[in-house]
Image: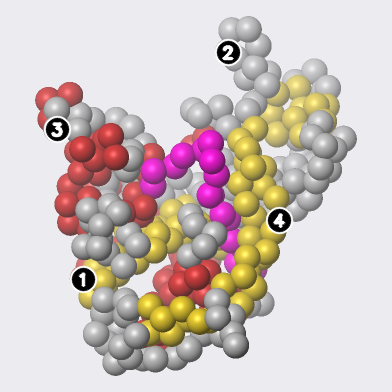
Amino acid sequence: MTARRVLNPVQRVAIFGGTHGNELSGVFLVNHWLKHGEEIARPGIEVRPFITNPGAVEKCVRYVDTDLNRVFDSENLRNENNLNLSYEVKRAQYINSIFGPKGSEDAYDVILDLHNTTSHMGATLILEDSKDDFTIQMFNYIKTSMAPLACSVLLIEHPRLKYATTRSIAKHPIGVEVGPQPQGVLRADVLDKMRRIIKHALDFINYFNDGKEFLPCILEVFKVLDNVAYPRNANGDCTAIIHNNLQDQDWNELKPGDPMFLTLDGRMIAYEGDCIVYPTFINEAAYYEKNQAFTTTQKMTLCAQSIRCTEPK
């Protein structure tokens, strides 16, 4: 007999925009839905659009004091020293009080967190838990619905790299990353892809709540391996840039010996790993401050059990 998971209906969904204030597709869509909520309304589901970092949105910057998408850990969420807290940590605590508490049964069922990237990642879904059958089934539905447009899945489950994302308060955290789009700029094609992803995500939830059974599925994902730094000299100055052969090649193979960086005197620096990897977030503008040139991933397949709702509408 095929294994099946029977899950509670999804009752509360949040759509976050402006976690990074200069990633404008999410800001633009959430502000639109705050005034015209009929587009995201689904029967029997509370769908709440929300601007997460209004201070950064107002200034059109990534953040005011620190990256909001990295501070949702237990230490920051419990910190009561209000005098010394950064703007973003205070926002994290406020967001957690509304949509959490993180890790509790009272937390929102789903959070869709909208982001843009300057990298050529196309439409990308970000998965935080490889055993979350509900989210894997949703991603499979979205990928199928978006076809023939590619929609990649990035799995950020990693023992060493801890993200503590804004969306991690939810039972099912979902990152939506669409690019390429410059910071502080809107592109119609990028915004349209993001809007379609949200539509399909909400449709999936609606079908699930209606009692539709989603049969076992297989999902191809790219699992994060490591972050690759830019070459730097003893003074900390960057000494090389992304090689032309690697630029804009998100999700494509990078083999040992392939060009990776190029110095200003024309010397090529090759990838010296011992296996094929699939880079992403290549030359992401926001990651220069993190000394991150790109992220390496490995391709793998996840399997999800059949799921259905305990109490269909």
Q: Is residue 2 covered in magenta? A: no
Question: CB atoms at circles 4 and 1 under 8 Å apart?
Answer: no
From the image, tell me which residue sits under label 4: 299
Can you give x and y, in whole percent of width and height, for residue 283 in the image?
A: 61, 39
Residue in the picture at 34% in, 49% down: 166
* x, y percent for residue 194: 46, 66
Indicate which disc residue 236 carries: 2
**Amino acid beneath label 3:** Glu
Amino acid at pointer 4: Lys
Picture quadrant of residue 199: bottom left
First reached walking from the N terminus: tag 2 or tag 1? 1
Disc 3: which residue: 80
Task: State the quadrant of the N terminus.
Answer: bottom right
Residue contact between numbered discs 2 and 1, judged by CB atoms under 8 Å: no
Q: Which residue is mark 1?
A: 35
Residue 212 relative to residue 83: left or right:
right
Give the spatial CA distance, label 2 vs label 1.
47 Å
Per the model, the C-alpha gap separating discs 4 and 2 is: 33 Å
Residue 107 at x, y percent in the picture: 25, 61
**Residue lying furthest right:** 257
| Amino acid identity at mark 1 | Lys
Instruction: Name the front one of labels 4 and 2.
Output: 4
Say which residue appears at 53% left-offset and 49% top-offset: 157
Q: Is residue 29 visible?
A: no
| Three-letter residue code for mark 2 | Gly
Per the rendered image, the range of residues in magenta is 150-165
In front: 251, or 184?
251
| Crowding near the residue tagged with mark 3, few <14, some 14–19, many ≥20 C-alpha atoms within 10 Å | few
Q: Is residue 141 left or right of residue 114?
A: right
Q: Nearer the viewer, mark 2 or mark 3?
A: 3
